[in-house]
Image: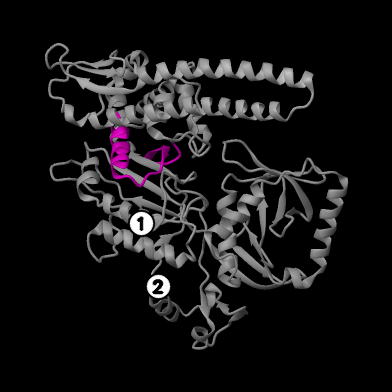
Amino acid sequence: MNYLPIIRFKNRWQTFDLNLHYPYSVNEKIITYTHLGYRGDACYIVDNECNTYYLPHDYAEIINDALKLHSSIYNECNTDSCRRQIITKLENINRHEYGRNDFELLNSVLAEQSRDGNYIHDRILYDTTCNKACVCDCNAIIIDVVDLHQSFVPSSTQRGRRSEITSTSLTVDEAARYNNSISFHSSAITFNNSEWDRGFINNIISSKTKTYIHQFNYIPKYIKHFMPGESEDTTLLLGAEIEVGGNNNISSDNYKNSTVKKCIQIMNGSDSDEENLIYSTHDSTVQIEFDTMPCSLEFHKNKMNYREMFEYLDKEGYKGHDCETAGLHIHANRNYLGKSRISQELVISKILYILEKFNDEICVIARRDNEYSEFVGSKKEENSLVELYGKYKDHGKRAALNLQHKDTIEFRMFKSTLKYETFILTLEFVKDIIDYAKSASIEEIELIKWADLMKLFSPALRNYYTERYNKQYKKTMNEDETLLKRQISNIKKAILNCKNYMMKTKLKQEYDELRRQYNKIHKKNKRKKAYHTVTHVDSRIDGLTSVGIYSQSGELIHRFDNMRNLNLTAI
């Protein structure tokens, strides 16, 4: 790639230019270190003179915007994977280990690139401090200006940076029909907003392919969906953000656009592409993000064609659970939590206490625990619910429960999935936790145990937790044994190849010690597997009022009381 944009940032102390030309520089100085993760702390970059420059937390989205604008003019960097690659490289810069000679070499490379007009060509200065992006030549002379639209009303329901490109790029043939001021860039032509012929532009835009993947800050007209007999005043509304990735065969954004269109039609159950049930927004960390309209749980279960849509995405090569960066975020309407803001915040505080108290168990269901959805409390060790609420409120949007939205709370701890049953059980789990937090007192939540909380779950959800726990537990134990096996094998090879008698004796001692450790862990894990693996459910305890879950060894693992109407076959 021959040329990339320069982005101008401004913070409380300074204004600086971030140059995306390799080897990456800030204010014409080599970048030696970056700390740009989403962990709630400061994002900053350090140059080779130890100057520190602080970036906003949504820097990745800003850079992605700049690269998309750049691609619309220069037809470069026109795929999500290219843009993500640039952002990832910038995130991972750490040249502290390099010596002086390496710095001199990098500086000389930067200086040579700056002198070489064939390298830089035209470039964009994407200025985040105003509403314009300037297209400059290699001598920093402005040759065109592209307007950025920033007239959105601030709202906590919007995600990311509130700017969107409103300049329109036309082909040369299309622009030949228009005689006003034009500027040529490669094979594309751009118009200044003030010089547009609105009717002409609209006619051309409408004739082009419809875009189904909206910008990340897109806000639709929300349509609430209920089942017959459900009341808006008393029904929990859930909206899902379903991220998918893993398809490395995508050649262009057009391919993804057609995929999204097909999913919308599947959800509608017809050829209609109306986005009344589901729509898509851009997310630089994954291939596609699907967002659902706010729906009741029963509507999600009975009226949304998730099973068919997931099967289609799986057939097309997309991944949910197996994509490391893909998450499943569930929004719940705040109005359901209480009529007043104070009552809502009380319920939220109780939800947070539950999430922290049963962190390990919830992570089994969520299948995820990383920087995209951090549990920021201390597992119920806070002095008060107010302190816990404050921690989550201050952490930002990447907390396990995101409190930054005005009208919803967002459960972010779940890993994505293309399995229908897992998706529906995730929605059920969110509703169960919310309903319990609404009805229980603080004292009850402090005293409740996980086994008691599980009684509120459906048989299918309890069974899902048990299966996930068994799978995760076995995986952990198997990893311990595998590591010891590998160490034993390596020492065995070293003994065979060792010619030194003293060294060989020492290796044999290490070998014997590892064998003892392995045998001990193997026997211990064998006993634990027998205890923790559920083999059957028996309803013969106290007639039909209780249910017992047994291990392979025949021991009673847990009993559920007051289960007269339980469908045992579902477990």
Q: Position of residue 18 (x, y in %)?
A: 70, 55
Residue 209 has which mark?
A: 2
Range shown magenta: 403-432
Colour scheme: one colour
Q: Position of residue 276 (x, y in %)?
A: 28, 57
What residue is at 47 percent from the left and 62 percent from the top? Answer: 250
In magenta stretch: residue 130: no
Dot 2 alpha-carbon crowd within 10 angstroms: few under 14, some 14 to 19, many 20 or more? few
Q: Position of residue 527 (x, y in %)?
A: 40, 16
494 left or right of 310? right
**Element on which disc 1 rests:** helix
The kind of residue tagged 1 is: Lys
- In which image quadrant can residue 529 be found? top left
Q: Where 179 falls versus 68 (above or below)?
A: below
* Viewer-nearest residue: 500 or 314: 500
What residue is at 48 percent from the left and 61 percent from the top? Answer: 249
**Element on which disc 2 rests:** loop
Q: Position of residue 247 (x, y in %)?
A: 46, 56
Q: Nearer the viewer, mark 1 or mark 2?
A: 1
In magenta stretch: residue 414: yes
Q: For the N terminus, which image quadrant?
A: bottom right
Residue 216 has which mark?
A: none
Residue 86 can be seen, yes or no? yes
Which residue lies under the disc numbered 1? 315
519 left or right of 545? right
* N-term-proximal mark, 1 vs 2: 2
* Viewer-nearest residue: 112 or 56: 112
* Viewer-nearest residue: 500 or 341: 500
434 left or right of 410? left
How far apart, in angstroms, are the residues tagged by discs 1 and 2? 24 Å
The kind of residue tagged 2 is: Thr
